Image (spheres, helix red, strand yellow):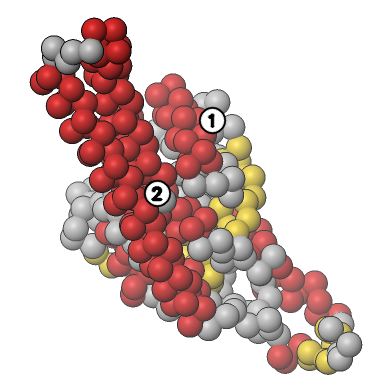
Amino acid sequence: MASGIMTRSQIKTPNVAVLLPCYNEAATIGAVVRGFKAALPQAQIHVYDNNSTDGTALHAMLAGAAVVRERRQGKGHVVRRMFADIDADIYLMADGDGTYAPEDGEELIRTLLTERADMVVGTRRGVHSDAGRNGHALGNRIFNILYRTIFGQDFTDIFSGYRAFSRRFVKSFPAVSAGFEIETEMSVHASRLKLPVAELELDYGRRPEGSHSKLSTLKDGGKILWMFAMLMKETRPFAFFGLISAFFMLSSMAFMAPVLAEYFETGLVNRMPTWVLSMALMMISFMVFTAGLILDSVARSRAEQLRIHYLSVGAPSQGLMPEKLMETAQGARTTRIA
């Protein structure tokens, strides 16, 4: 096995971008920006203001962040804009409401680099038992179970907004969501392409007085459920259309059964409209099943294209090392690698 020497001059600190999408977070954004500047002094802090009316942009600017305004309302629009605008080696995304500790950012980055992952999710400790409101906690449990049932076992907290990404992930992620469903779309993208991912359990804080959640349990829950259906249709069309086909087939058999029973008993078909309806439903079932088979092949082809595009983005350099790991290694003049 060949070995080589990597000198300290060859080990560089990664270019880290901290991304903070915000909407009316004036009460917390200043402290959040200062927290990240203290925890990650070499990082660039970017605040994308989504039409706030409470001075969020001014507070972020005074705290030292680069501020950009995104006029299209919705977190998905903001994340799509951030991913398109900003170039970095590592992206760290958090919320501007102060519920995530900036001090945990370095551990997310360390995990991203040491495990050579494309996304690390900071799962929220205790969020499933108490997310501020009982409706939110119940929704978290239901949607996470539903996600693992449909898309795989990669994640236990798909709604966490505290995540670290590689450049490969960010520049190959085809964000289409408009709102808070964007985290779900990120998770499905990683599961679909079987990207290396990791989770890190972190404490989840409370909003300070004067800061309020923008989530609506029923409205946003409905949007997320719709997103689940759309993502299942796009990524697992055979399963999606197979369920619809099964529904039509069962309906057909329910209408067909009494007509057949009567025919075998008397030799007559007295309920011809019911028989015609049952056969129409059976034909629809076959057509939907066939559509699912065809679209499954299309989905596989699209996944292959996404994978090729992902591979076309340069892999992260093996010489990247978190700043504090560099400080730990400062006493060593060289590091031997295989």
Q: Position of residue 277 (x, y in %)?
A: 16, 26
Nearer-the-camera pick, 237 or 293: 293
Image height of 119 relative to 289, above or below: below
Mark 2–mark 1 distance (CA, rounded to whole Å): 31 Å
Give residue 230's position: percent from left, percent from top.
31, 48
Element on which disc 2 rests: helix
The residue at which mark 1 appears reads as 128
- Density class for disc 2 (Cα within 10 Å; few <14, some 14-19, many ≥20) is many
The amino acid beneath tag 1 is His
Residue 272 seen in the figure: yes
Considering depth in this image, is 234 or 334 the residue closer to the camera?
234
Q: Residue at x 10, y 20 (%)?
A: 273
Nearer to us in this view, 247 or 229: 247
The amino acid sitting under disc 2 is Phe
Find residue 251 and report its horizontal and vertical position in percent. 28, 24
Front residue of 296/63: it is 296
In the displayed image of the protein, which residue is found farthest to the left? 273
SS for dot 1: loop
Q: Quadrant of residue 58?
A: bottom left
Quadrant of the rendering where the C terminus is positioned = bottom right
* Residue drawn 18% across the image and 13% down it: 268
Please give the label number shown on residue 158.
none
Give the class, few, some or many, for how many residues have Cα within 10 Å of label 1's Cα (few <14, many ≥20).
some
Label whose residue precedes the other's in the sequence (2 or 1): 1
Left or right of 55 on screen, residue 152: right
Residue projecting furthest to the top: 265
Inspect this view and state whether residue 60 appears: no
Q: In which image quadrant can residue 229 be found?
A: top left
Identify which residue is drawn at 26% across, 26% down. 252
Residue 132 lies in what quarter of the image? top left
Residue corresponding to mark 2: 238
Residue at the image position 61 percent from the left and 63 percent from the top: 196
